[in-house]
Image (tube, helix red, strand yellow):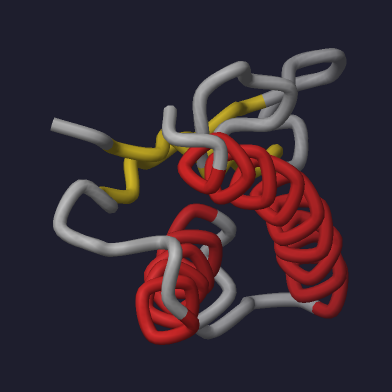
């Protein structure tokens, strides 16, 4: 089963978010896995479907779709989403390149 675990600074594809510290000096890290074994990433349609799955996962991990209770929480969710998207883009690009090479 091929899957993408979105986590910041992870070797496998993963979506991760770093939430605000719950206590001084404490960082909460959330991750989720995005499946892609059923997709042909050599096609535009397969790549688009994976991008959509990653976006949904990133929003979930960063709690971006939830209702923030403060402006600070909204900023943190947005920063998390930006970082998760960036990290995921790099991981997805590497996977697509690997599949193009026959991997």
Q: Residue at x 15, y 57 (%)?
A: 38
* Whether residue 88 is situated above or below residue 58 in the rendered picture: above
Q: Is residue 46 left or right of residue 91?
A: left
Question: Could you say which is closer to the camera, residue 102 or residue 72?
Answer: 102
Residue 88, x across and y down, in percent? 65, 50
Res. 85 visible in picture: yes
Residue 63, x across and y down, in percent? 52, 65
Q: Residue at x 74, y 16 (%)?
A: 26
Q: Residue at x 76, y 75 (%)?
A: 74
Q: Which image quadrant is residue 45 in?
A: bottom left
Q: Is residue 17 left or right of residue 76?
A: left
Question: Could you say which is closer to the camera, residue 3 or residue 65?
Answer: 3
Residue farthest toward the front in the current orientation of the protein = 102
Res. 66 visible in picture: no
* Whether residue 42 is situated above or below residue 49 in the rendered picture: above
* Quadrant in the picture for the C terminus: top left
Q: How many circles with numbers are drawn on the protein?
A: 0
* Quadrant in the picture for the N terminus: top left
Residue 57, x across and y down, in percent? 42, 61
Question: Could you say which is closer to the camera, residue 76 or residue 92?
Answer: 92
Q: Which image quadrant is residue 43 in?
A: bottom left
Q: Residue at x 55, y 50 (%)?
A: 96
Residue 75, x across and y down, in percent? 86, 70
Q: Is residue 36 left or right of residue 88?
A: left
């Amino acid at each position: 089963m091929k899957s993408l675990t979105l986590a910041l600074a992870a070797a496998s594809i993963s979506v991760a978010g770093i939430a605000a510290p719950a206590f001084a000096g404490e960082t909460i890290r959330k991750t989720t896995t995005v499946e892609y074994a059923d997709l042909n990433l050599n096609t535009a349609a397969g790549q688009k479907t994976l991008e959509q799955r990653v976006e949904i996962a990133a929003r979930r991990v960063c709690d971006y779709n939830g209702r923030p209770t403060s402006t600070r929480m909204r900023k943190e969710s947005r920063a998390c989403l930006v970082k998760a998207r960036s990290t995921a883009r790099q991981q997805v690009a590497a996977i697509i390149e690997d599949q193009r090479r026959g991997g």
